[in-house]
């Protein structure tokens, strides 16, 4: 069917070229009909569908152009007919496709059906009669299924035509990359000549199809199983642009390896425009860049011949960790030939996947960098001594091998662009090279268990599960001479053996000299040592190459740490004992500088019906955009490098509001609980593992996942530093359970998924940015009389609603809290703009919520968390059970409709800071900031000292004028010339609020008669933390008495702030 459809396209194009537009229109119409029918076949491969879709679009474009031309021609004929009254009848010559005329085979200027991947065969065909004649011709006379001859423009040069013919031949030989490069070269030449028809750009479209076909046959090694979201792709693309070089994505059709012209990049030899700078030691040796053909003119060069680790030799470049990485990779490939850990990353390659020598001198190295497999292109020029021709970079002692120098140059170009290599870690290098999980063990750690680590490393190294390098720490000059070990130097671990009760490791110095002089070295003259070395086949020749055996005890004593790289394909076993490929789920995000847990990136690992407990592994990889400062990450305690920790919590018992209401995670939307601090869930809530902050760009965290269904929360955290910049990162989960695709119609009954948790999850969300301003709004905690001056917000709920209030404090050393308060209604408050402000949590409060503890970085108040309910005597949220298990099982109660005051506060007063307030509800809400106290009113301030007089019962509304309460306490007389609203606040002017033990009260009286005073307003019970008079209406020309009293005798100094809607007279009596 596809052949017939493409035949129609072929004939339509020929007829169009001949100017037979009517017939071409019929053929294009038939072709479109047949192509649509073919595309409905679900058995088509991706590449076939792409090619046929392109043909469909191409046919539609041609059909549209033909009909446009025909309409224009008809319009011209109509105009001519109007000018000539009696025109001759014209035969349109229209024929139906059922009996089409014969079509001659000839070259066309159109490119469309000529260039396509070989998965879709194309036969140059004609209508029925001509096709039958063609079937009688010899097979040799027919045009090739993959012919590109028709793609050559009529005016294109012979070079372009020849290149197209060569590309056709290579495509038939399934040399996809060579075919793409040759065709790309033809396109570039055609553009350069500027001697081409307008449709020449169609070659570029088919180049894209060929690149896709290439990727179908040669898939990238490092792929995540979950899809990359658009926001994540933006992060990855930005991470490919560094300050020195660009790192294209390997599998990107527009910029990846299939786009990179390797075989025909230019005329002559290719030269990389970015040349790494030579190091000081290389310049001292007179090094210059020479092509490998100039250095070894008569050598039978190859990329990899044997990958012998003993052939790798480091010279004057100080990149011992990277060289050790190459050595242990070569050792692994030698031990496990099918594990082409080196061969798989160097290109170009032949059809067997083995790297080959490129006459053009251009090579591409594939590395996992900044969250994605990326391309690093280098040329075959290497530092060498011009006189001797000796290489002054790391090389293979097999003079025909190039892989060592190629890999080093790729690393140098990536890690700073200079052979003055800043240093690295072999686990980080191997993660870039192979995707193996980076890890390390410190011999100097107090938790280091040599017995446990030996058993762990011995068994895993033998079966190829781990690769190891060991590094020395600081050694004195005397120790270096005595032990023959270099200080701060890395050694490759080639073998681990246990012989006659001795635990031994075979190490190699990348310098290929200076071996060990301790036990089981050639300097050890003991008979036992000589016998054991003979058994191990250790010779002086090996010692001269820097190879030696050392005991595990000496390693733990004289070395500081070892870098580990874990084979991801050996993490899990199938029931038959064979290794199982892990499921890899990745997320890519940006990490802003913040100390608030509520603002840091958080991720949800959803585990559904896990049949048993399992071990999971998370790899954190920080993206490096400034490659010039690459080596800084390995400097201990450098303030410019962020220290990051990955924490995993089990929050299964703490569903979010959305989960309580039945929401489940979907594609691009997560409903798992976000953490604000952790104390909101339960006291002692801790991660599933030991937490460690690291400055390494890549490191692995392993943890145990329980059986069954669970919600795991991943929280990233960073330590405060002087550099307050955000950075991009990737987080990759390795697990043995299959992936659950959240975008599928039918989800798997069991498996794992991981995705980012958004800042808001409920339908209605409001975010406010605020600050505690010094001297204005830094009120401090509730036990301080200045609490009322904190920023406060009025939340209005139109309907009963579930509620979450999250306070994020990005930079502040003082712990924070957020309060949600509902006050008693007072009609007089309607005339006071700030009447909803809260002075103290017991001042007319009928309900309030707050986080269980003040916490650094922020807190959350959530109606689904039983620990947040602090005071609810009227049971607005219903009966609350204290038992956590029961509270979790019960659906949370909504908050009743009404007005609530939200107060963010710090523990200490006077501390300036910024904050973010996030309010989420299930029903519509309104959030507005409450004006500061006194806004719009006239402020009058009186100061004095308490008299420490008698107290009166607050329940007594009438008091005689002669009562000692009036004569022994401070009084202020108030007189309003016009009716107004009054409120007042009493502040004690003490040096330290925390030591204040004076409880005070404000009571307002007016004359009832000549002998009695009537109490019309009171601040309430005697309180320690400052009191305020609620809004009260004053009549005009009436003298009121405001009494300031204390619960016990005191002469503390006070300030009385009076706020009135109109000016009043106030004086102390």
Image (cartoon, rainbow, N blue to C red):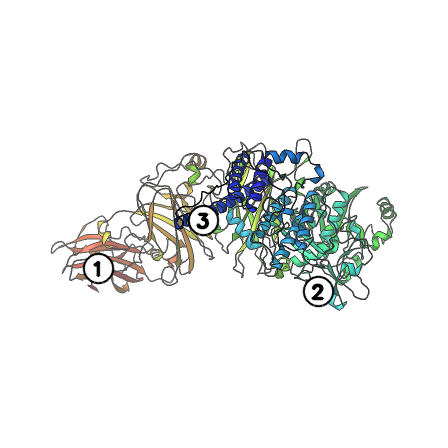
Q: Quadrant of residue 196?
A: bottom right
Nearer mark to the viewer, of 2 and 3: 3
Local crowd at mark 1 within 10 Å, few (<14), some, or many (≥20)? many
Question: Which marked residue is nearer to the observer: mark 1 or mark 3?
Answer: 3
Counting residues from the start of the chain, the first of labels 2 and 3 encountered is 3
Q: CA distance from mark 2 to mark 1?
A: 79 Å
User: Is there CB contact under 8 Å for labels 2 and 1?
Assistant: no
Q: Is residue 751 above or below residue 731?
A: above
Question: Along the line of sight, which residue is nearer the eye, 753 or 848?
Answer: 753
Q: Residue 709: horizontal and vertical position, in percent? A: 52, 34
The residue nearer to you, when weighing 933 against 996, is 933
Secondary structure of residue under mark 2? loop
Q: Nearer the viewer, residue 62 or 390?
A: 62
Q: Confirm whether residue 427 shows in the render.
A: no
Give the labeled residue for mark 2. Answer: 278
**Dot 2, crowdedness within 10 Å: few (<14), some or many (≥20)?**
many
Residue drawn at (28%, 50%) of the image: 1021
The CA distance from mark 1 to mark 3 is: 81 Å
Few, some or many C-alpha atoms within 10 Å of disc 3 (few <14, some 14-19, many ≥20)? Answer: few
First in sequence: mark 2 or mark 1? Answer: 2
Name the residue that disc number 3 marks. 72
First along the sequence among labels 1 and 3 = 3
Q: Is residue 197 visible?
A: yes
* Residue 149, placed above or below residue 1000: above
| Helix, strand or loop status at disc 3 | helix
The residue positioned 62% from the left and 57% from the top of the image is: 633
Q: Which residue carries the number 1 mark? A: 1061
**Quadrant in which the C terminus appears:** bottom left
Q: Residue 550: x and y, percent?
A: 78, 50
800 vs 859, left or right, is left
Say whether residue 938 is left or right of residue 364.
left
């Amino acid at each position: 069917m596809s052949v017939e459809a493409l035949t129609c396209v072929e004939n339509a194009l020929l007829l169009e070229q001949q100017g037979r537009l009517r017939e071409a229109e019929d053929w294009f119409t038939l072709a479109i009909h047949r192509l649509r029918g073919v595309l409905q076949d679900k058995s088509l491969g991706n590449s076939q569908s792409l090619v046929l879709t392109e043909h469909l679009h191409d046919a539609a474009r041609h059909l549209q152009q033909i009909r446009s031309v025909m309409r224009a021609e008809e319009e011209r004929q109509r105009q001519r007919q109007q000018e000539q009254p009696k025109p001759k009848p014209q035969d349109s010559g229209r024929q139906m496709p059922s009996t089409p005329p014969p079509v001659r085979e000839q070259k066309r200027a159109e490119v469309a059906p000529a260039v396509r991947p070989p998965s879709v065969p194309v036969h140059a065909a004609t209508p029925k009669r001509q096709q039958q004649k063609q079937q009688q011709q010899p097979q040799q006379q027919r045009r090739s299924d993959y012919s590109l001859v028709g793609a050559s423009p009529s005016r294109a040069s012979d070079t372009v035509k020849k290149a197209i013919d060569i590309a056709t031949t290579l495509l038939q030989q399934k040399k996809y990359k060579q075919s793409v490069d040759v065709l790309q070269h033809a396109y570039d030449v055609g553009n350069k000549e500027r001697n081409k028809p307008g449709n020449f750009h169609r070659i570029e479209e088919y180049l894209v199809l060929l690149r896709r076909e290439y990727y179908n046959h040669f898939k990238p090694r490092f792929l995540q199983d979950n899809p990359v979201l658009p926001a994540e792709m933006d992060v990855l693309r930005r991470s490919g642009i560094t300050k020195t070089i660009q790192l294209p994505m390997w599998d990107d059709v527009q910029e990846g390896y299939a786009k990179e012209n390797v075989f025909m990049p230019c005329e002559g030899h290719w030269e990389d425009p970015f040349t790494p700078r030579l190091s000081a030691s290389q310049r001292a040796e007179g090094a210059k860049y020479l092509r490998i053909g100039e250095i070894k003119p008569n050598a039978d060069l190859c990329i990899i011949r044997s990958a012998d680790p003993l052939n790798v030799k480091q010279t004057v470049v100080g990149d011992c960790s990277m060289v050790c990485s190459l050595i242990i990779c070569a050792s692994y490939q030698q031990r496990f030939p099918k594990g082409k850990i080196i061969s798989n990353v160097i290109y170009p390659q032949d059809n067997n996947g083995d790297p080959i020598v490129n006459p053009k001198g251009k090579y591409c190295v594939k590395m996992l960098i900044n969250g994605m497999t990326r391309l690093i292109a280098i040329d075959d020029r290497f530092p060498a001594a011009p006189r001797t021709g000796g290489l002054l970079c790391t090389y293979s002692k097999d003079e025909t091998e190039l892989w060592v120098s190629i890999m080093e140059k790729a690393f140098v170009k990536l890690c700073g662009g200079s052979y003055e290599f800043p240093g690295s870690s072999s686990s980080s290098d191997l993660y870039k090279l192979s995707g193996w999980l980076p890890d390390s063990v410190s011999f100097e750690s107090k938790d280091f268990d040599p017995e446990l680590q030996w058993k762990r490393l011995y068994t895993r190294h033998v079966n190829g599960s781990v690769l190891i390098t060991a590094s020395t720490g600081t050694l004195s000059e005397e120790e270096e001479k005595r032990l023959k070990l270099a200080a701060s130097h890395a050694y490759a671990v080639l073998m681990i053996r246990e012989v006659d009760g001795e635990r031994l490791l075979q190490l190699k110095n990348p310098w290929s000299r200076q071996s060990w002089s301790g036990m089981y070295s050639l300097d050890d003259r003991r008979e036992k040592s000589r016998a054991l070395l003979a058994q191990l086949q250790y010779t002086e020749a090996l010692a001269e190459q820097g190879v030696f055996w050392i005991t595990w005890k000496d390693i733990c004593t004289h070395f500081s740490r070892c870098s580990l790289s874990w084979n991801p394909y050996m993490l899990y076993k199938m029931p038959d004992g064979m290794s199982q490929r892990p499921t890899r789920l990745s997320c890519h995000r940006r990490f802003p500088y913040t100390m608030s847990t509520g603002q840091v990136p958080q991720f949800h690992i959803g585990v559904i019906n896990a049949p048993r407990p399992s071990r999971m592994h998370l790899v954190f990889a920080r993206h490096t955009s400034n490659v010039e400062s690459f080596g800084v990450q390995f400097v201990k305690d450098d303030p410019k490098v962020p220290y990051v920790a990955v924490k995993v919590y089990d929050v299964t018992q703490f569903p979010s509001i959305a989960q309580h209401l039945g929401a489940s995670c979907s594609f691009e939307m997560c409903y798992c609980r976000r953490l604000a601090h952790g104390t909101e869930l339960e006291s002692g809530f801790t991660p599933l593992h030991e937490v460690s902050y690291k400055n390494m760009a890549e490191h692995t965290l392993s943890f145990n996942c329980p059986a069954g269904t669970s919600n795991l929360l991943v929280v990233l955290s960073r330590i405060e530093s002087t550099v307050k910049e955000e950075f991009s990162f990737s987080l990759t989960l390795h697990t043995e359970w299959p992936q659950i695709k959240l975008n599928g119609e039918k989800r798997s009954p069991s498996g794992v998924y991981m995705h980012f948790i958004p800042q808001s999850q409920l339908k209605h969300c409001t975010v406010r940015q605020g600050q505690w301003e010094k001297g204005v709004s830094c009120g401090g905690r509730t036990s301080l009389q200045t609490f009322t001056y904190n920023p406060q917000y009025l939340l209005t709920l139109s309907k009963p609603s579930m509620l979450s209030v999250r306070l994020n404090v990005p930079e502040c050393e003082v712990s924070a809290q957020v309060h949600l308060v509902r006050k008693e209604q007072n009609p007089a408050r309607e005339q006071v703009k700030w009447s909803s402000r809260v002075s103290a949590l017991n001042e007319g409060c009928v309900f309030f919520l707050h986080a269980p503890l003040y916490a650094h970085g922020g807190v959350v108040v959530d109606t689904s968390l039983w620990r947040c309910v602090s005071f609810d005597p009227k049971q607005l949220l219903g009966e609350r059970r204290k038992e956590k298990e029961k509270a979790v099982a019960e659906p949370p109660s909504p908050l009743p409709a009404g007005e609530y005051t939200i107060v963010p506060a710090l523990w200490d007063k006077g501390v300036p800071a910024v904050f973010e307030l996030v309010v989420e509800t299930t029903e519509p809400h309104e959030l507005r900031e409450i004006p500061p106290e006194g806004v719009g009113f006239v402020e009058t301030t009186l100061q004095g000292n308490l008299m420490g007089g008698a107290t009166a019962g607050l329940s007594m509304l009438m008091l005689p004028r002669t009562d000692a309460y009036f004569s022994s306490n401070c009084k202020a007389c108030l007189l309003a010339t016009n009716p107004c609203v009054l409120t007042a606040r009493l502040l004690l002017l003490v040096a330290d609020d925390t030591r204040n033990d004076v409880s005070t009260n404000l009571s307002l009286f007016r004359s009832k008669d000549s002998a009695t005073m009537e109490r019309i307003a009171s601040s309430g019970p005697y309180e320690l933390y400052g009191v305020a008079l609620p809004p009260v209406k004053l009549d005009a020309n009436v003298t009121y008495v405001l009494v300031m009293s204390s619960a016990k005798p005191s002469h503390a100094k006070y300030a009385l702030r009076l706020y009135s809607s109109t000016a009043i007279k106030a004086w102390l009596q």
